[in-house]
Image: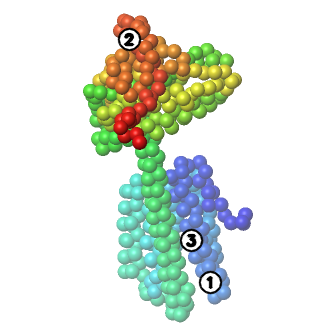
Amino acid sequence: MSWLPNIRYGTEGYPEKVARRLRGFNIAVWVAALIPAGMAIVRFIDGKWKVGAADVLVATTYASMPVLHRFGPIIAPLAFVGVSYAVIFWVTSLVGTNGAERIGYFTATALGILIVGTERYLITIILAIVSAALIIIVEVFLPRDTGFVSPTMVFLTNFSASIVLNSALLYGIIFYAVRQMERAEEAVERERQRSEALLVNILPPRVADRLKERPGTIIADSYREASILFADMASFTLLAADTSPEDLVSFLNSAFSRLDALVERHGLEKIKTSGDAYMVVSGVPTERSDHLSALANLALDIREAVVGLVDGKGRLVPVRIGIGTGPVVAGVVGTRKFFYDVWGDAVNVASRMESTGLPGRIQISDEAYKHLKDNFEFESRGLVDIKGKGEMQTWFLIGRKTLVTLVDPKDVA
């Protein structure tokens, strides 16, 4: 409906919070303009042309109030309140206090407070005091009936109209204010849920809960036993050199999303990705006695999942996997772009197991082998020169051992 006035008139250059108030103001003053416009019709019918012309002037003044938005966010609201105070006093002096126009002081003040904003509390307090003072002055000094119109017309056109229209305006003002408050609360709740979802994506749920319960606290925990896995794409740096950024990110996202699903299925904790490297921990932050075997099972599933992995150009991208086990320290680092990480010799060993491993193979330390040898199959790789460690005995994890149930010949019929 193009004939309807645009409620956004004059509000385009303001922040959304202020613009919402001014849009509400535009609606209110255009509705308020209907009151003197309606009264002007009554005055013209009654033959009171001068008073009717004054009502037309008031209606026009109200309707044009949004033009004042260009001078500042509170100019139009204050002008509206000032004009309303003067008009109410003029009409009351014209017809007497029987017309109940003085109720409009409350409406004008309520609208002024809504649009000016509670942050300008001194202005709102002044408006409330002036409104109360004017009501008292009108009640004390103006006559009940001036004889300007008949008592019946006073009741029908002044008293009843004032009650109905002011009630409608006050309802609209309160409804608008409450609705804005509800929308703000809904927005805050959505933002809180979004923030919590992001926090859980960044941190393990238990760690995220601790951080929410005690913001600013240092989170650092030690674990006597935990296991760490590193996975890395062999020769990926060379493959990525002639790959477009979009294809590279798309490939990494697809590959890591596949690994994320496996980590979640096994109930373990992904720590981070760095370039094409992928890090998982078991036994942190939730301790578990089977941390190493759980990580070994994940490693076998990862190896199976990435068989035949190719980049955007169809080139094979083999993956190296390394596992280490031992005591670690875990905690949250940073205050803004914080992250959860794990440190310790076991982490370094796991990283070296990956970097010195072979494409498509799972290399583990001798310590990890001793804990897993009863339930998994291995192939000895022999001694490997490990940076910072010297020569270390390492093993390749081949698969899970098949459980064989021995049957007593006597039990066979």
Indicate which disc, 1 or 3, sits on the residue closer to the N terminus: 3
**Height in image: 62 above or below 190?**
below
Residue at 43% across, 72% down = 106
What secondary structure is marked by label 3? Answer: helix
Residue 32: give its label: 3
Q: Residue at x 54, y 29 (%)?
A: 304
- Mark 2 or mark 1, which is nearer the start of the sequence? 1
Q: Which mark is residue 393?
A: 2
Residue toward you, 191 or 149: 191
Residue type (three-letter) at the residue carrying disc 3: Ala
For the residues carrying marks 3 and 2, which lies nearer the camera in this image?
A: 2
| Type of amino acid under label 1 | Arg
x and y, in percent, of residue 282 in the image: 37, 31
How many neighbours does mark 1 have within 10 angstroms: few (below 14), some (14-19), or many (20 or more)? some
Q: Is residue 288 left or right of residue 232?
A: left
Separation of residues labelled 3 and 2 (CA atoms): 88 Å
Q: Which mark is residue 253?
A: none
Residue 235 seen from this side: yes
Residue 280 pos. (x, y %): 43, 29
Label 2 amino acid?
Gln
Residue at mark 1: 43
